[in-house]
Image: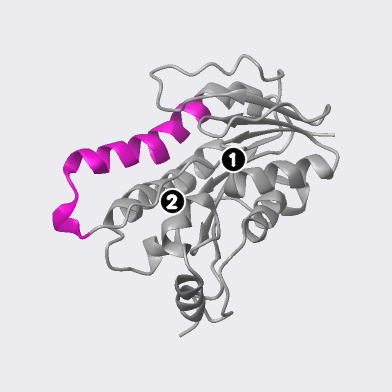
Amino acid sequence: MKNYLIIGGSSGIGNALTHQLAQSGHRVYATYHTHPKNNEGTNIIYSPLNVLDETIDLAFLPEHIDGMAYCPGSIALKPFSRIKPEAFQEDFALQVIGAIKVLQAVTSRLKAAENASVVLFSTVAVQFGFNFHTQVACSKGAIEGLVRSLAAEWAPNIRVNAIAPSLTHTPLAANLLSTEEKIAANATRHPLKRIGLPEDIASMASFLLSNQSSWMTGQVLHVDGGMSGIR
């Protein structure tokens, strides 16, 4: 049994990942902010956490954790001319600074484990430009830089990788997938002709957190229905 920390483990991809790890027999410490959860048996321990707070309290964690995933995010799609600089700062605070605060807070616990692993999340929009994606692409571009730099600094004891999904059927994407017509139109844009599911992304995250990926670090893996690699 391993100990895993999932930040944002009560909804979407984080929720799917939490349950996949728990069903594999691991102990999962999952945090929530806007989607409260009760503890489920002995394998999933939920704790409230707001990554935007000036200081964060992770005292509920054991002395070592074998891996962590940072799942909070946002999808705000607007023309560049309509985005105020403050919106970029708020997005950066959630998706980048929040991850940095958690990583700095758990560094000693990751180092205490053998072959610990960190998984962060980017987006296909960093590599493959889309209209109206400047806000999210800026933050996620920073995540990709963080992943590669931190992977170099923490090798060989802690591995750091990222997943860059395309549009996934989660609460964050609810406005983009609110009708059958929107779902069908977005599915058509992908070579595999469907929208990604939280379980699709969580399965890759589970792999990256496990020893099965023990010779991988500094990678940004595209789980995007073929969008970034097929024309």
Sequence-first tag of 2 and 1: 2
- Left or right, residue 104 beside residue 110: left
In what element is the residue under mark 2?
A: helix
Q: Describe the element under mark 1 as helix, strand or loop.
A: loop
Whole-percent x, y for residue 97 in the image: 39, 33
Q: Which residues are magenta?
A: 79-104
Q: Is residue 88 magenta?
A: yes
Q: Position of residue 1 (x, y in %)?
A: 85, 34
In this picture, is 146 found above or below 166?
above
Between 191 and 153, the one lying in front of the other is 191
Question: What's the residue at 65%, 43% (across, down)?
Answer: 15
Amino acid on which disc 1 is placed: Ala
**Residue count near mark 2 (Cα–Cα under 10 Å), binned few <14, some 14–19, many ≥20:** many
x, y percent for residue 120: 53, 45
Q: Amino acid at mark 2?
A: Glu
Circles 2 and 1, Cβ within 8 Å, touching? The answer is: no
The residue wearing badge 2 is 144
